[in-house]
Image (spheres, grey):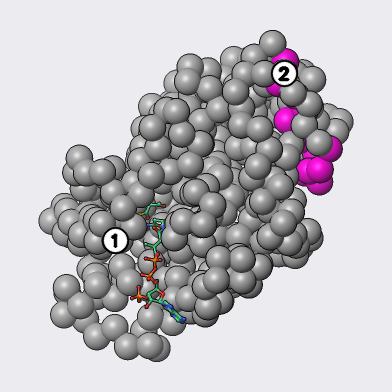
Amino acid sequence: MTNTTVNSLGIHDIALATTTFSLDMKELADANGVDVNKYRTGIGQDMQSVPADDEDIVTLAAAAAQPIIDRHGVDDISTVILATETGVDQSKSAGLFVHSLLGLPPNARVVEVKQACYAGTAGLQFAAGLLSRNSDEKVLVITTDIARYDVGSSGEGTQGAAAVALLLVANDPAIALLDPVSGFYSNDIMDFWRPNYRSTARVDGKQSVAAYLEATIQAVDDYLDKGGLPLSSFAAFCYHQPFTKMAYKAHKNLLHSHGIEADAERMEHDLAASTIYNRAIGNSYTASLYVGLLSLLDHSHDLSGQHIALLSYGSGCVAEFFTITMQPGYREHLRAADTQRSLAARTPISHEQYLALRNKPADDGHDREFDVQTTSGFRLAAISDEQRIYSTTIEHVGAATG
Ligand code: CAA
């Protein structure tokens, strides 16, 4: 076992997957009797990703991680940390289904972590802790979620789904160094939650927005108190995006609270590139911040050597403000064209088709076969004897469960 210094570790690879279907906000606006500009301009969303009948957080997670496995293989992956708030089992980690679908080594440990949309960042920091203990290992962190609110509710415009997988290594990561200073804030509030018996979230929309703004200020204050970089140091800011306008609200509020002018040019410079994918995908809870990060990297000029600020927020609530430093040559390791192709390849569906998908029977334990719809290579084939049966068409993977 070798030790390493904490500030040489970071993100070696990152990849995104989203759903087979998309819903244009015009479809939702017309059905809900809402002016489409409330969605497009008011909350900053053009489309939302909609899962196919045979897609869930496991198939999304496997699809996000597959390109990373194709590039780096499975050797040395010691740990899989899957972050979600769309859990498919009260006991078993969804990561174990992914472990099987990807053919990961039996000697890897697998765990699921939860704290609303924040859990992916917890996973990243836990990975850093593991890597600082043993620098020979690699840790796969997968953020994966389906954001779902009641049909016709005001939250419905902020739905979406995606997964982002990140491979963390201890030395010389190809994409970015994870900087050592982080600011935290936690507070026991009920702004958004999902009791065990519900498949959709309960939310106090206005309180959740106010709580996010307050948590951002507090987490940044903690970061600065711990000797973090001044706010003027960052080439860009990347926020958790339940809807893209939330990033603008939070950033403006943060800048104002530090006496910094938040004019349109400044906001565009700091944020715009990080919102492009999220405008088209919608909220993806744990994945949303990392969708934003990929959007920033895929749509920016070369940021090598520059610092990026990230704000992670999970309702309930926990926030963390932390930073990364881009590695020289990181752009050669991105997959911008593949990501953009997969977003463009989603099949647009009508509101009637969306409702038909929403009205499928809930997972109530009854045996059920799922319609063959996904284009991802991983599918939830059936529920049988209260077990989830997954299958894959990807050839090189190991023991798939169906
Ligand atoms: N043209 C342009 N803009 C319009 C418009 C129109 N025709 N009609 C309304 N708008 C604007 C409004 O002025 C408003 O803008 P401001 O926020 O700048 O004032 C914006 O559109 C939204 O309008 P409302 O405030 O009336 O919207 P709403 O109350 O119906 O719903 C919401 C907004 C509360 C965010 C709701 O979508 C919701 O509850 N979403 C789920 C919760 C959520 O995402 N919370 C975010 C923080 S919590 C978090 O981040 C964790 C997480 O992932 C859930």
Residue type at mark 2 is Asp
Describe residue 281's horizontal placement relative to residue 133 as left or right: right
Q: Mark 1 or mark 2: which comes first in sequence?
A: 1
Above or below, 164 against 225 in this view is above
Above or below, 264 against 122 in this view is below
Q: Is mark 2 within 8 Å of ligand 1?
A: no
What stretch of residues is rendered in magenta? 372-384
Residue that protrudes farthest toward the left in the picture = 225
Describe residue 65's horizontal placement relative to residue 241 as left or right: right
Q: Position of residue 295 (x, y in %)?
A: 56, 65
Residue beneath the point at 77% across and 32% down: 370
Residue where numbered disc 1 is placed: 206
Residue type at mark 1 is Lys
Say which quarter of the image contains residue 123. Answer: top left
Q: Quadrant of ligand 1?
A: bottom left
Of the 4 image quadrants, the one containing the C terminus is: top right
Residue that protrudes farthest toward the top in the picture = 385
Above or below, 43 against 134 in this view is below
Residue where numbered disc 2 is placed: 367
Residue beneath the point at 49% across and 49% down: 149
Q: Is residue 383 magenta?
A: yes
